[in-house]
Amino acid sequence: LAATAGAALNTDATSPAYWVPASLFRRDDGSRGVFPHTVTDRAKPGVIAVNSVGRRFVNEALSYHEFGLAMLRDGNGEPDRPFYLVCDRQFLWSYGLGRIKPFTRSVQRYVRSGELVEAPDIAQLAAKIGVKPAVLSATVANYNGHAKEGLDPEFGRGSTIYQRHLGDATHKPNPCVAPIMRAPFFAMRIYPADLGTAIGMKVDAQARVLREDGTPVAGLYACGNDLGSIMNGNYPGPGITLGPALTFGYIAGRHLAEGVTIAPSTAKAPV
């Protein structure tokens, strides 16, 4: 509709969408579900994210948008490139993973469904997820060597207030870092998913859709994800698509109302 009316698109955003790592599962009725890994598990101590060759590629405690961007960079934009969250039995019991809640006594139904991969050691876990056992074993060993001291020299996990806030405040010295040591070991595949788009129509201060020459399209307004991101594709915090949707919707309504003339009603009020 907008294109046929001559609307211009804002295509220079730093990212075309807002990203989040997500895992997939099957509901009881057979339909596919998507679980967004926002703030519940990745920053907790004792889990790492690895790429298709079994190496860490990101600070796991970053915001979900930054984490998603890291997945896209590492995978060269290929949506089917596999990524995994890897943890041990202690982590799964204490914090859960994805839609698996903490203190879940048995996770076998998640293993049987394929949502969760389980193995008695890291080498066998690597074989099950299709990466070289030697590479994943070295990745975990390197991480563990520093994690015992609460350190992550490779990515600086737990180095900001934001990251530590999402960790475990009771875990010392670093609320975001702990070794992965207690068998069995687990992996969950994650995918880059989007929460909303940043590419959209160009508008002016009255929420009017603009043409390429900067003139407004008469009678056409846009708000929410239909307009180009006012943050230019950046993601300063949750709800960044909601505030602009409400604001520009209000602005559009006000501007529309200014051009409407309502004739006085001749109807009599009910007695």
Image (spheres, helix red, strand yellow):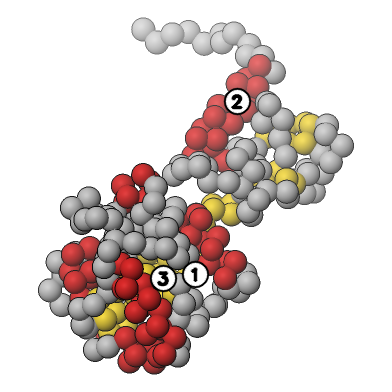
Q: What residue did someone put label 3 on?
A: 49
Rounded to the nearest angstrom, the CA distance separating label 1 from label 3 is 7 Å
Residue at image location 60% in from the left, 21% down from the top: 254
Q: Are marks 2 and 1 in contact (CB under 8 Å)?
A: no
Q: Mark 3: few, some, or many residues within 10 Å (few <14, many ≥20)?
A: many
Quadrant hosting residue 129: bottom left
Residue 79 visible here: yes
In this rendering, position of residue 54 left or right of residue 1: left
Q: Where is residue 262, by image quadrant?
A: top right
Q: In terms of sequence position, does the residue under pointer 2 or pointer 3 come before the other?
A: 3
Residue kind at label 1, given as amino acid type? Phe
Q: Earlier in the sequence, mark 2 or mark 1?
A: 1
270 over 165 or under it: above or below: above
Residue 259 location, x and y as percent? Answer: 69, 18
Q: Secondary structure at mark 1?
A: loop
Identify which residue, 185 or 193, lies in the foreground.
185
Judging depth in this view, the residue of 220 and 35 nearest the camera is 35
Residue type, label 2: Ile
Cα–Cα span, label 2 and label 3: 43 Å
Residue under label 1: 57
- Considering depth in this image, is 27 or 172 the residue closer to the camera? 172
SS at badge 2: helix
| Circle 3: residue type | Ala
Image spot of residue 172 (x, y percent): 21, 56
Q: Please say if 14 is above or below 270.
A: below
Quarter that holds the C terminus: top left
Q: Residues within 10 Å of mark 1 (few under 14, many from 20)?
A: some
In the picture of the structure, the residue carrying the numbered disc 2 is 251
Give the mark toward the camera: 2 or 1: 1
Marks 1 and 3 close (CB-CB < 8 Å): yes
